[in-house]
Structures are given as C-alpha cells and as structure tokens.
C-alpha cells in the first residue's frame, strides 16, 4: 500500500509550508503490518515531516539538541500512533466481514 500524504507536525510549521505531501529530509515513515490467515499482509504507512534532518539537527547546545530530539520524537510517535490505529481499524473491519459470513 502506498504511503499517505505527509502530516504536519508542530515542530515544522514554518519549514513545511508548501512542502505538504512531499518527502523531504527529516520525513519519518512508519509502516504497520498485520498478516491475515491467508498469508496476505494488511498494511498502513504514515509519513510525517519531523522538521529536523541530519543537516538541521541542532547539536550546538543542550537545549538545541533537546528541542531537535523532541521534534523528531513527536513525529515518530505521531506517525506510529496513526499507522497503528489505521491498521487496527482495517483488521477489525475484516474480522467483522468474516463474522457476518
């Protein structure tokens, strides 16, 4: 399954203007897969722009590092939660279809 458009993250408001939907350095992608009984994978991928990349990650001060790390971590958590929720919903929808038959 193709990845969805890139979600906005509060850490990248200024940097992401005009870039929505495009993968850029610092884009985080999380994919969640559940294997069905027939061996086929149910898969959802979510991308979010973290607002930081190797080139922009601030290592000049402790506070800068912590801010950059926080932005990266928030993007990872946001993508993980959304991908997990979407995959679980798709799985449960299939379970519901099977129970009706």
Image (tube, rainbow, N blue to C red):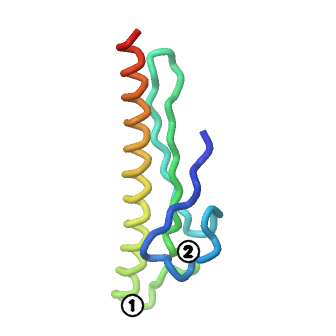
The residue at the point 37 percent across, 51 percent down is 81
Q: How many marks?
A: 2
Real-space CA distance between mark 1 and mark 2, rounded to the nearest whole angstrom:
15 Å
Percent of width and height locating residue 39: 51, 19
Of 23 and 93, nearer the camera is 93
On screen, residue 1 above or below 25: above
On screen, residue 88 above or below 66: above
Percent of width and height locating residue 5: 58, 56
Question: Judging from the image, what secondary structure is the residue with disc 1 in?
Answer: loop
The residue at the point 39 percent across, 59 percent down is 78
Quarter in which the C terminus is drawn: top left
Classify 10 Å Cα crowding around label 1: few (below 14), some (14-19), many (20 and above): few
Quarter in which the N terminus is drawn: top right
Kindly give the residue lying farthest to the front in the view shown. Answer: 100
Question: Judging from the image, what secondary structure is the residue with disc 2 in?
Answer: loop
Percent of width and height locating residue 38: 50, 15
The residue at the point 49 percent across, 31 percent down is 42
Percent of width and height locating residue 26: 55, 68
The residue at the point 53 percent across, 67 percent down is 49
Please name the residue that numbered disc 1 is placed on: 61
Residue 70 relative to residue 28: left or right: left
On screen, residue 59 above or below 4: below
Residue 1 relative to residue 33: left or right: right
Of 46 and 89, nearer the camera is 89
Sequence-wise, the earlier of marks 1 and 2 is 2
Residue 21's disc is: none
Please name the residue that numbered disc 2 is placed on: 54
- Rendered image quadrant of residue 90: top left
On screen, residue 42 above or below 44: above
């Amino acid at each position: 399954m193709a990845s969805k458009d890139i979600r906005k993250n509060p850490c990248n408001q200024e940097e992401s203007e005009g870039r929505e939907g495009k993968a850029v350095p610092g884009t985080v992608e999380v994919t969640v897969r559940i294997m069905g009984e027939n061996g086929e994978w149910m898969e959802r991928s979510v991308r979010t722009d973290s607002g930081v990349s190797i080139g922009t990650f601030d290592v000049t001060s402790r506070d800068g590092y912590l801010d950059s790390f926080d932005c990266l971590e928030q993007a990872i958590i946001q993508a993980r939660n959304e991908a997990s929720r979407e995959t679980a919903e798709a799985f449960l929808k299939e379970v519901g279809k099977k129970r009706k038959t």
